[in-house]
Amino acid sequence: MCGIFGYIGKRNDAAKVVFEGLKRLEYRGYDSWGIVAKQETRNRKQETGDLIIEKHVGKISDSSLNSKLLTLSSRLAIGHTRWATHGGVTVANAHPHLDCSGKLALVHNGIVENYQKLRKSLGKKGHKFKSETDTEVVVHLVEEYAKRQSLKEAVRSAFQDITGLNAFVFISDKDQIFAVKSATPLVIGIGNGDNFISSDPNALLSYTKKAILLGDSQLAEISADNVRITSLVTRKKIKPKVLNIDWKAEEIELGRFKHFMLKEIYEQPQILRNIAQNYTQQINQLCKIIRQAHGIFLIGAGSAFHACLAGSYLFSKIAKEHVNTIVASEFNYLEDFLTKDSLIIALSQSGETIDIIEPLKRAKEKGSKIVAIVNNQGSTIWQMADYKMLLGAGPEIAVASTKAYIAKLAILLLIVNGLIGKLENSQSLLMEAAAEVERLLNEENSTIEKISRELAKHEHIFTLGRGLSFQSALEAALKMKEVSYIHTEGLAGGELKHGPIALISEGTPCVVFAPLDETYEAIISNAAEIKSRGGLIIGIGPIQESVFERWIKVKDLGVASIIANVIPAQLFGYYLALERKLDPDKPRNLAKSVTVK
Ligand code: F6R
């Protein structure tokens, strides 16, 4: 969702650095953006300089930064990509926001829950507001405190008046950045004679790999050559831990691909091999933790929830264990039975999904243990966990999750086999799955593209699976609908006759997952029921049944078939988007990390 990027240092084109940083944050989703830079004065001894601000509605493009900011001599700037929550998508509502004096600027992620009350009381004190946002209230609140306090103290005082989960970054007309947060991430990038701040480590990769994660209720004062962190509560200095971001700058480039979604789909064989070969120790350690737990809960949102659902079938089928799988946003309402022996395993690509963070906070209060299986090192969920495991999928830029989803399935497969002492078998199975995924990408790609041209003409598609493939149907539907905007509905085969079959008419496409497991006969009967009502059946599986009008061959890999089976669905989504002239990387209304409820 919203993104923050800031720069302070030796370069004199700070606005341009921030502009480039914001482009790296585009993938998170936004509807407007803005930058504020402190103009350098000719006299280097003079500390203060004017703040020059520029805001836009719509997308960032090379030509959309005004020449004034691009050519401005500046060593300090902050910028923001906004995903509207409070107040419509307008230039006035875009960040940064200035105080009445125009000497203090703020960018913000999160929601200030008590902003209306604060706005009223600041209004009575003479503050004038130019936007409808909760953010603008905060910059005026700091201005109000700064009448009696230093700017640093004013930031501290204002922060204590605010409720909600937030991250704020301020600059004034002096050479310093102030940052505070109560939830959503802020990462400080340590450069050489310069420093950065970003809501996302990806955006720092072209400049530095050394990063400090700002903690909740901490205040950072950042200058060109120093970062000082203090506790907001005790005022004591905190010695920060400097992390090494282990992703490469090339990983956030398109390379030979036209879109990140396709690039990430093609990276999957390598990710599977990496997980098969390098996770033994971590899986064994995690299995020990799982064995000690009483009550295991798998939680995630969207695609991650589908992986959780696969997990519950795998736990039952292979480890003969019951785990509870719950959509993370619903876990909030189902927590009363948690105890200190409960174990919550949270699956998340971003590690920033608010729907997961909130229930995890409550679970922690009850003393339950938390395992995070996330892609982003240092993310909020990663920091909250008692035991952490990285997905190892590398940066995922396309909004629709592909490689992180596959990585989650692979890790779950290793866990359940680890629990019964058969880790090695599952590692070989993953290597086989990697080879099959590679074959699908090389040999079936053009068939899938051809079928997509046919599907693109329809407004409704159904996807169907049973058992382990129920979640494949859900994930396929999500992947197809979110990038193509075609209504695609995922169904459990057994549910067909309980209502949805009423929607099948002449030519309605239906993607049927038919792996060679205990669901095979029943799912083929479901396909026949749909076909006899005029539906067009696209079969995915190892056998070309006569009921299939179109067929994508996927080798039988036992339980690992769920890994290979999702590849055609990911490619369907991608090609459907292209066929409908849509950008598969940035679907409308969607954000890469969902940081507000
Ligand atoms: C779908 C998709 C979303 C995410 C969901 C959870 O393609 O990307 O459904 O899976 O928003 O996000 P994370 O995994 O970051 O918690």
Image (cartoon, helix red, strand yellow):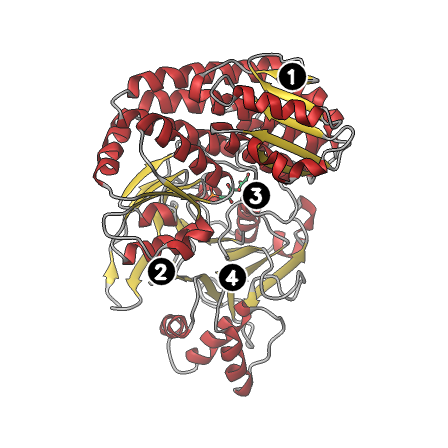
Residue 13: x and y in percent read: 54, 50
Counting residues from the N terminus, which is met first, the one under dot 2 or under dot 4? 4
Q: Where is 137 relative to 546, above or below?
A: below
> What residue does disc 4 label?
107
> Hey, which quadrant is residue 270 in on the image?
top left
| Classed neighbour count for the residue bearing mark 4: other residues with Cα under 10 Å, few (<14), some (14–19), many (≥20) | many
C-alpha separation, residue under disc 3 versus residue under disc 2: 26 Å
Mark 2 secondary-structure assignment: strand
| Classed neighbour count for the residue bearing mark 3: other residues with Cα under 10 Å, few (<14), some (14–19), many (≥20) | many
Please state if 503 lies on the left or on the right of 379 as rendered: right
Counting residues from the N terminus, which is met first, the one under dot 3 or under dot 2? 3
| Classed neighbour count for the residue bearing mark 2: other residues with Cα under 10 Å, few (<14), some (14–19), many (≥20) | many
> What residue does disc 3 label?
27
Residue 454 visible, this angle: yes
C-alpha separation, residue under disc 1 versus residue under disc 3: 34 Å
Looking at the image, is mark 1 or mark 4 nearer the viewer?
1
Callout 1: CB less than 8 Å from ligand 1: no
> What residue does disc 2 label?
220
